[in-house]
Amino acid sequence: MFTFDIIRYIMLYIDSSTLNIFIQYFFIFLVIIMNNSTFFFDIDGTLATYQKPVSHQLREKLLYLKIKGHKIFLCTGRGYSDLPPNLLSIGFNGIICSTGAYLRIQDKVIWDCPFPRPLLLELYNYLRELKISSYFEGSSFIYRAEQGESLEKQFPAIDQLLQQPPSTMDAIYSVTFHLKQAEELPAIIQWAQAHHLNLFMQTKLHGDILMKECNKAIGIKKMLEYLHLTDWPSFGFGDSPNDIDMFRAVNTSIAMGHAPTEVKEAASYITGTFEEDGVFEFLEKFE
């Protein structure tokens, strides 16, 4: 009788749009509690930032997902050498770095797609010729193209790396560039397209260049195939344009509340902002 009264109340007093949202969220709730699922999380602006680590309550929620038998993965544009130890200590089931160019499970690299040395040299010389600030993300270090005493203390120089023999050289998976003005962008886009490279803009003046075979969707596909999890329900959380590929690769996509419009439009759901701990807010509804 009690259940019937609840159903009758919902049907009589809740408008159709609210009822539709309720049904959608209830469906996700059933998926999570009845099936083991895979969860893919962007880092910056989603789980953490360089200034603010993952919240305690979200950290506990991620650990709880693992205890319940779900699989959790990082899916980030950061290089492996740039991952924060406090986040790695959660014990993710797998890590997708450099926007899908570097996949790792514990100490094993299961797939990667680095720049070939000749192409890397050409890209380095091109950016240097245009005097565009750039950083080269490897599996061991982030390398700088600029000079400067403060930079030298933080990052080794890319030109020193390029002088090493190929057999000992750290692989480079992503090149991050910072423009002084937006008018510089069309030439870089044209160069990347001519060399069959992927280019992702994070802001109007900041972007990443990768091999054509690399994006977050490809990384997710290869990770799930390797672990034989392609039939598990999948969820993806992100806030940046490079997360749109991730959204296309999962069953349910969740955009952060502060994400650009294009990212929100590509998502299944929109949760709270990073400052509101939006990932925790979404997960808390279903576990």
Image: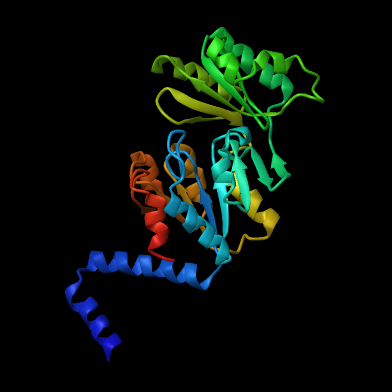
**Left of 25 or right of it: where is 66?**
right
* 128 w.r.t. 176: above or below: above
Asked whether residue 216 is in view, the answer is no
Residue 9 lies in what quarter of the image? bottom left
Asked whether residue 200 is in view, the answer is yes
Residue 81 lies in what quarter of the image? top right
Query: Considering depth in this image, is 49 or 178 the residue closer to the camera?
Result: 49
**Left of 133 or right of it: where is 106?**
right
Residue 72 lies in what quarter of the image? bottom right
Query: Considering depth in this image, is 257 or 130 the residue closer to the camera?
Result: 257
Q: Residue at x 48, y 67 (%)?
A: 32
Query: Considering depth in this image, is 43 or 201 the residue closer to the camera?
Result: 43
Where residue 177 appears, x then y in whole percent?
51, 21
Where residue 188 appears, x then y in whole percent?
51, 19
**Left of 232 or right of it: where is 228?**
right
Query: Which residue, as the protein is rendered here, is positioned at the far bottom?
Result: 1
Rendered image coloring scheme: rainbow
Q: Residue at x 36, y 46 (%)?
A: 264
Q: Residue at x 63, y 37 (%)?
A: 101
Where residue 224 appears, x then y in whole percent?
63, 55
* 122 w.r.t. 239: above or below: above
**Image quarter (top left, top right, bottom left or bottom right) of the N terminus:** bottom left
**Image quarter (top left, top right, bottom left or bottom right) of the C terminus:** bottom left
Where residue 26 appears, x then y in whole percent?
37, 70
Query: Considering depth in this image, is 45 or 100 the residue closer to the camera?
Result: 45
